[in-house]
Image (cartoon, rainbow, N blue to C red):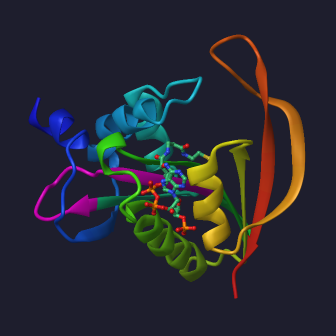
């Protein structure tokens, strides 16, 4: 499938971001799977999340491609938001797409009333932690044994917080 092949192939086209809708549910499920998380998301689950009025989902695209190369999803509650997931397709990591996507997403969350953004990241996930620190997320706690691993062990989660201006 051309879209799946494109996820693994680098591209030098300029990036743009856009809010995703239910028509992107299958692509979000595939991207989430490629994120390597212990629990996958079914397309129906992604569609329900995207359709939830409290959930904000943005995608990053390259050139004229209509399929996202990455997505980020957050749930809002009052003046807070929690990042549920962010994934860039494996062939496109380390090219700044995560930063472009997160910048646009944080701007949207701010426009929609969020003042504080929370997330959890697995200890030793260096690209993700660097990405978050780049945006001034600060560590506010650690949860030992939070993430189940494929080998049966459990990894520590670092809880992070960003106060939007
Ligand atoms: C985390 C993720 C979204 C980052 O996206 P990305 O497009 O690769 O990130 P960027 O290219 O914008 O780089 C962001 C930062 O990470 C750093 N980085 C990127 N790839 C890296 C790597 N392999 N090792 C170390 N640092 C890395 C960049 O140098 C940059 O840091 P800087 O601002 O200090 O220079 C992506 O790696 C990914 O999809 N990972 C799998 C899913 C995942 O772990 N999601 C986070 C769950 S909490």
On screen, residue 9 above or below 12: above
Quadrant of the rendered structure where residue 112 is? Answer: bottom right
**Residue ID at (41%, 70%):** 100
Question: Is residue 65 in sight in this rendering?
Answer: yes
Q: Is residue 64 magenta?
A: yes
State left or right for residue 122 relative to residue 50. right
Residue 141's spot in the image, x, y percent?
Answer: 90, 53
Residue 85's spot in the image, x, y percent?
Answer: 55, 47
State left or right for residue 155 relative to residue 39. right
On screen, residue 24 above or below 60: above
Considering every residue shown, the one lying at the far top of the view is 152
Magenta region, residue range: 61-75
- The one nearer the camera, 61 or 124, is 124
Point out the image quarter for the C terminus.
bottom right
**Residue ID at (27%, 70%):** 16
**Residue ID at (25%, 39%):** 8
Residue 32's spot in the image, x, y percent?
Answer: 44, 36
Q: Is residue 26 magenta?
A: no
């Amino acid at each position: 499938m051309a879209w799946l092949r494109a996820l693994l192939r680098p591209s030098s086209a300029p990036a743009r971001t856009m809010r995703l809708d239910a028509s992107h549910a299958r692509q979000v499920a595939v991207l989430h799977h490629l994120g390597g998380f212990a629990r996958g998301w079914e397309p129906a689950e992604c569609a329900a999340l995207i359709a939830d009025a409290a959930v904000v989902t943005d995608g990053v695209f390259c050139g004229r491609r209509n399929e996202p190369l990455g997505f980020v999803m957050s749930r809002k509650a009052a003046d807070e938001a929690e990042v549920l997931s962010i994934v860039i397709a494996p062939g496109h990591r380390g090219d700044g797409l995560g930063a472009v996507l997160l910048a646009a997403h944080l701007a949207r969350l701010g426009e929609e009333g969020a003042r504080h953004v929370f997330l959890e990241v697995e200890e030793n996930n260096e690209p993700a932690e660097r990405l978050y620190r780049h945006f001034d997320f600060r560590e506010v706690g650690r949860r030992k044994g939070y993430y189940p691993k494929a080998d049966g062990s459990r990894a520590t989660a670092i809880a992070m917080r960003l106060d939007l201006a």
